[in-house]
Image: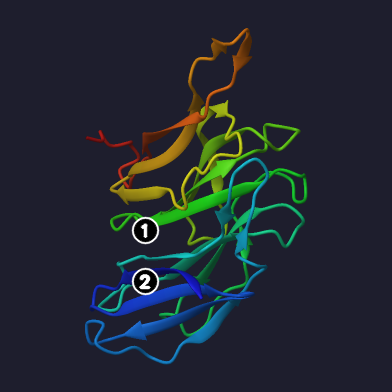
Amino acid sequence: MEGFDAAVGPDGTIYAVWSNGMHLEMATSTDGGRSFSKAREIVRTAPAYFKPQNVSRGDGFPQIAIDPRGGKRGGPLYVCWTDYRHGDIDVFISRSSDHGRTWSGPVRVNDDPKHDGADQFMQWAATDPLTGDLYVVFYDRRGDPENNNATITLARSADGGRTSRNYSWMGKPFDPDNAFIGDYSGLAAYNGCVYGDWTVETPAPRQRVAGYREKPAPRSIVQVGVARFPTSGGRAQACE
């Protein structure tokens, strides 16, 4: 069992998820984490620990997010993960409208053609507590026929996870060069403003050593992105 994540509803209920082999499991707590319900399977997946091409390792461990609107217990729950059920790595979400009792079938988040040989991986998900929109950030290789270089894509769902529109957040591709780029990215959203962070590898300048050029180890750099989307007023907000 790996990849634990949790979300807290407006009534204080803790919803915890993790990966266990070929499925995601969930448990809940209504007493501040002092005790939890019996763990149970909620979504079937492909294996969630894998090695994407050209990075040292990767995983599809889940995140859980809640729309806090919708009464005392809040609105829908979402789980997000990656797996390779279609032959390359894709990002998926599943939705629960009854506080985790039942879950929808997996919905693919990345909108490139299915089984096109491009990996999307190392996702993170967040909901906007004011608008209810669901956002997912991930590394994206749809622009490289060799499936090596990656960019950053932000997906937004404004219809409860049924469909997602993809936006290029970092359009300039980078070469991971088989480096360790971390286990997780980060994402937060509030009132139409979305904040993300991720790691890229920037090779240091080559230096001539003993008559030949030697390639140094890549340098890891954490980047931060800000995106703005219209809210109910129809205008994008200024984001600090």
Identify the residue at horizontal 33%, vertical 54% (top origin): 128
Residue linked to disc 1? 132
Residue 60 seen anywhere in this rendered image of the structure: yes
Amino acid type at circle 1 is Gly
Left or right for 151, reference 28: right
Left or right for 121, reference 76: right
- Residue 206's x, y, as percent? 54, 15
| Colouring scheme, one of rainbow, by chain, secondary structure, one colour | rainbow
- Residue 28's x, y, as percent? 36, 84
Residue linked to disc 2? 75
Query: SS class of the residue under badge 1?
Result: loop
User: Most extreme residue toward the top, as rendered?
Assistant: 211
Q: Tell me the distance, in whole angstroms, between the alpha carbons under discs 2 and 1.
A: 9 Å
Amino acid type at circle 2 is Gly
Query: SS class of the residue under badge 2?
Result: loop
Question: Which is more toward the observer, 86 or 131?
Answer: 86
Identify the residue at horizontal 36%, vertical 70% (top origin): 6
- Residue 85's x, y, as percent? 72, 62
Can you tell which mark lies on residue 149? none
User: Quadrant where the C terminus lies?
Assistant: top left
Left or right for 73, reference 151: left
Identify the residue at horizontal 58%, vertical 51% (top origin): 57
Please determine whether, in this image, residue 126 is positioned above or below residue 112.
Answer: below
- Residue 190's x, y, as percent? 28, 49
Question: Which is more toward the observer, 208 or 158?
Answer: 208
Question: Which is more toward the observer, 182 or 234?
Answer: 182
Question: Which is more toward the observer, 203 or 92?
Answer: 203
Please determine whether, in this image, residue 104 is positioned above or below residue 80.
Answer: below
Q: Are marks 2 and 1 in contact (CB under 8 Å)?
A: yes
